[in-house]
Image (cartoon, coloured by chain):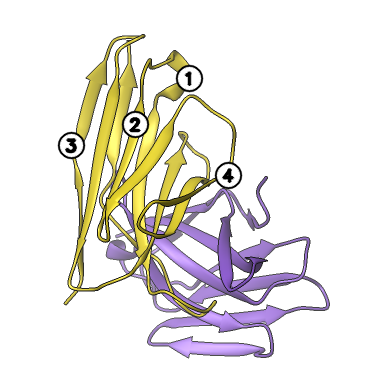
Chain colours: A purple, B yellow
Amino acid sequence: SQQGEEDPQALSIQEGENATMNCSYKTSINNLQWYRQNSGRGLVHLILIRSNEREKHSGRLRVTLDTSKKSSSLLITASRAADTASYFCATVANSGGSNYKLTFGKGTLLTVNP
Amino acid sequence: SQTIHQWPATLVQPVGSPLSLECTVEGTSNPNLYWYRQAAGRGLQLLFYSVGIGQISSEVPQNLSASRPQDRQFILSSKKLLLSDSGFYLCAWSGAGGSLQPQHFGDGTRLSIL
């Protein structure tokens, strides 16, 4: 079953605007990761935030994590047409022993119009 | 640097035919390996993962099986394909040991069953 649920399902913005995507989850996590997928391609890891972190930055990306609300957000600032892709959050939890499993949400389709 | 190869990129198969999808990783040893399926407009469903040669964990009961005959080779198989096996299949690898390892994906195989 899916752990993370992204919101909105689809987002369309103009180049230069900021894009915010949200992710909610249900159970305890070790960390949360965000991935990007261009149409018809594999996923690319963007950023990881640990359960004891509240905010993390990487270039134009800003991720927040609120474990009390079981939610995370991904902010892309000054968006570009090349940012057009689907964005997925994935929660990481222990699946037994030293093994960890990622559980992906359904994703947000971001379209950045030039 | 590490690379992951998945083939074929697209495949059209009749119902009842066998399947073999192959994934290989280069530039790393003892990776964790994963097979996912992605239905249209949905997130990724973990099918199998492997933490070592010959060690396969199945996440969902289904018509598929996986094998890991070599350290960096992961194969997804079926003896008789069903219509419901159509989808986008993604292979991924991560470093062994620990929850802070991001997953690295191949470019996927689009499987259509007729």
In the picture, the disc for residue B8 is 3
What chain letter is assigned to the residue under label 4? B
Image: B40 above or below A65: above
The quadrant the C terminus of chain A occupies is bottom left
Marks 2/1: CA–CA distance = 15 Å
Where does the image place residue B88, in percent across and percent down from the top left?
36, 36
What chain letter is assigned to the residue under label 1? B
In the picture, the disc for residue B44 is none
Do marks 4 and 3 share a subunit? yes
Q: Secondary structure at mark 3?
A: loop
Which of labels 1 and 4 is toward the front?
4
Marks 1/3: CA–CA distance = 19 Å
What chain letter is assigned to the residue under label 3? B
Marks 2/3: CA–CA distance = 13 Å
The residue beneath circle 4 is B59
Q: Secondary structure at mark 4?
A: loop
In the picture, the disc for residue B84 is 1
Question: Which label's residue is closer to the chain start, 4 or 2?
Answer: 4
- Assess disc 4: are there few (<14), some (14-19) or many (≥20) residues with their C-alpha within 10 Å of its C-alpha: few
Image: B73 above or below B17: below
The residue beneath circle 2 is B77
Question: Which label's residue is closer to the chain start, 2 or 1?
Answer: 2
Marks 4/3: CA–CA distance = 24 Å
